Image (cartoon, rainbow, N blue to C red):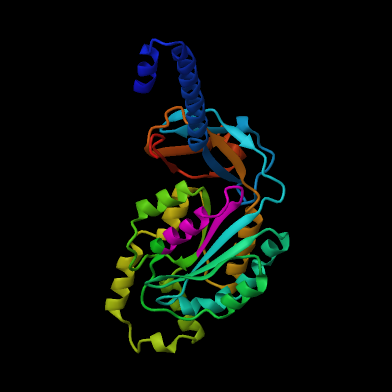
Amino acid sequence: MKFCRMIARWDSPRAGVMFFICVSLLAAASAQETTLRTRSNLVLVPTLIKDAQGAIVYGLHSDDFVVEDNGVEQPVRLDEAPEGQPISLVVAIQRGRRASYEFPRMQGLRTMLGPLFDIGSSRIAIVEFDGQVELTRNFTNREALVDDDLSNLQPGNDGAAILDAVSYSIQLLRNEPEDRQRVLLLISETRDHGSKVKIEDAVAAVGQGNVMMYALAFSPGISNILDTGRGVNKSEMHPTLDLLDLAYRTAQAMRKNVPATVTSMTGGEYELFTTRKKFEVRMNDFTNHLHSRYLLSFAPKDPRPGLHQLRVRLKDPSKGTVLARTSYWAEDANKN
């Protein structure tokens, strides 16, 4: 603006021309900034609706939904999912602590991922973690490579850095093209052991990356009891009841369930599995639900930077139960 004022004070035939050029450039820049802000402030809210029996509800319209941003109702748009939208999926698998006892229950994972490869446009990455996070396989559309990785899972150390794995996986997905559906499948126990990332930062990362997150979790305590009954974990058995161990497990069970917390805040799905059959049922639900969400979006009336509370509900609650993110992080539009 100072530059334009200087031009306007020039007393020459060229002053009017230069002033016109300056104003035109400022108008173009302003229009471009407005366009960028509108795009960056668009909030995507993929929403799943289930009936009382847990079946997916189809056939709803935008006027069936109410979306509130910090308590203020927003105008909602419902987009059609692109036909055959390509998928980028990160499968993050815990290998630390007691996870190796779960490997036999997860044998169906390779088969259940098959339909995604059959689509032809899916890309899958494999992340393994214990106390550390490791990229086993970067995004690939070669099913044989993923099969080989999942067939050779090895036990890890005593760590289970779930939040570190979530944040690492989200960063991988954020580097994928925006026209791809970004999905994180987390397979882990319920409690975090050793992460450096805070849960608030992990949730913000999920929201900023427009990622749909699914969690299939196992409980080490429950699995230990089941394995004891089957006699497959003799190295963990005690000749008598270990009261200190029982007290420890009880205390740990009272702490937060990390996968459930993150998925509930981001509108994902969380399921607990204890057998191979239940794992395969949950995986089948996962693949079926990938293309079953309503693609809601809105431009916030008050796009202030920071954390926003989000609530999605149905005008007629009897139509089903809503699964949608409960928060999102708005970026500062003035930041470079």
Could you say where residue 39 lies in the image, as x and y percent from the top left?
Answer: 52, 35
Work out whether 188 lies above or below 229. above
Q: Residue at x 49, y 24 (%)?
A: 25
Work out whether 265 lies above or below 145. above
Q: Is residue 250 left or right of residue 148?
A: left
Q: Residue at x 41, y 73 (%)?
A: 130
Q: In the image as oriented, which residue stretches furthest toward the front?
A: 12
Indicate the quadrant containing the N terminus: top left, top right, bottom left or bottom right: top left
Q: Quadrant of residue 334?
A: top left
Q: Residue at x 61, y 72 (%)?
A: 146
Magenta segment: does it hold 180?
A: yes
In terms of depth relative to the viewer, which is nearer, 187 or 175?
175
Indicate the quadrant containing the C terminus: top left, top right, bottom left or bottom right: top left
Q: Quadrant of residue 145?
A: bottom right
Residue 28 visible in image: yes
Residue 108 visible in image: no
Could you say where residue 14 lies in the image, as x and y percent from the top left?
Answer: 46, 14
> Which stretch appears magenta?
165-186
**Numbered-mark total:** 0
Could you say where residue 310 lies in the image, as x and y percent from the top left?
Answer: 45, 38
Could you say where residue 55 lies in the image, as x and y percent from the top left?
Answer: 64, 51
